Amino acid sequence: MVLSKVIKEHIIRNGENKIYTVSDFADLNNDMLVTRVLSRLKEEQFLIRLSQGIYLYPSRNRFGICKPSIDQIANAIAEKDHARIIPSGLTALNELGLSTQVPMNAVYITNGTPRTIKLGNRSITFKKGTPRYFAYQSRVFTMVVTALKQIGDDKVSDEVLMKIKSILDTEEKEKVNHDYRIAPQWIRKKLKTVLYGNN
């Protein structure tokens, strides 16, 4: 089928780990046929169906399909939406290595469209974030802010603060200084000693 070949070649040309929906092929003016083609490509294991109507062209190695992580899927969706995302809450804690708990519902702050995407028994939730979250220059510092908010002011231990210090020590100092200045007051108070000593 000519249409099937056109769709497949378009997907291959775009590269691996890209997300597709029927609307990506609106120029073909045949949504019903595109739906059938995407479904068939999923049956052929050329695509992975992430959720109803959402497909991923995965990366592969000599053992077969490399199943993407939740974070890779979230970033692929964000790229498709031309949006920025920041891991939030338990997702941020896990990504920073401050918690070994892998959340069933991964939560990201976005400057794009808020929504929840079901992935089997797991889900990805994109929550609309205030502009302040996107004013930070370091993505890692932003995650530290969302992680500390998840823990709560009165439950942040010295051990967590020392881990955060070691994480932020690998970031560009200028970015950390900038982000520290615009962080919420209680977070600045928590980080002041570990980042700058008692000065």
Image (spheres, rainbow, N blue to C red):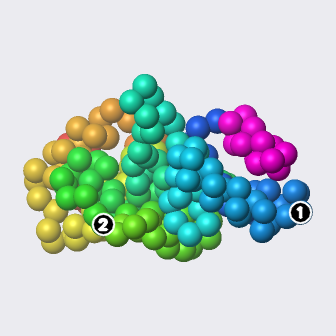
Q: Position of residue 172 (x, y in %)?
A: 42, 33
Q: Nearer the viewer, residue 83 or 41?
A: 41
User: On the image, numbered disc 1 is attached to which residue?
Assistant: 29
Left or right, 126 with respect to 169, comes to right
Which portion, as a residue range, is magenta?
1-14
- Residue sitting at 57 percent across and 53 percent down? 42
SS class of the residue under badge 2?
loop
- Residue sitting at 62 percent across and 70 percent down? 113
Q: Nearer the viewer, residue 180 or 5?
A: 5
Q: Position of residue 84 (x, y in %)?
A: 57, 55
Q: Is residue 55 visible?
A: yes
The three-letter amino acid code for the residue at tag 2 is Met
**37 up-or-down from 132: above or below:** above
Q: Which marked residue is nearer to the observer: mark 1 or mark 2?
A: 1
Q: Is residue 11 magenta?
A: yes
Q: Position of residue 193 (x, y in %)?
A: 20, 49
User: On the image, numbered disc 2 is attached to which residue?
Assistant: 104
Q: Nearer the viewer, residue 67 or 102?
A: 67
Q: Quadrant of the C terminus?
A: top left
Please tell me whether the stretch drawn in magenta is mainly helix, strand or loop: helix
Left or right, 191 with respect to 88, comes to left
- Residue sitting at 28 percent across and 40 percent down? 167
Numbered disc total: 2
SS class of the residue under badge 1?
loop
**183 up-or-down from 196: above or below:** below
Label 2 Cα neighbours within 10 Å, binned few <14 / some 14-19 / many ≥20: some
The three-letter amino acid code for the residue at tag 1 is Asn
Q: Position of residue 90 (x, y in %)?
A: 29, 63
Assess whether mark 2 and mark 1 are in contact (beta carbons under 8 angstroms). Answer: no
Left or right, 171 with respect to 159, comes to right
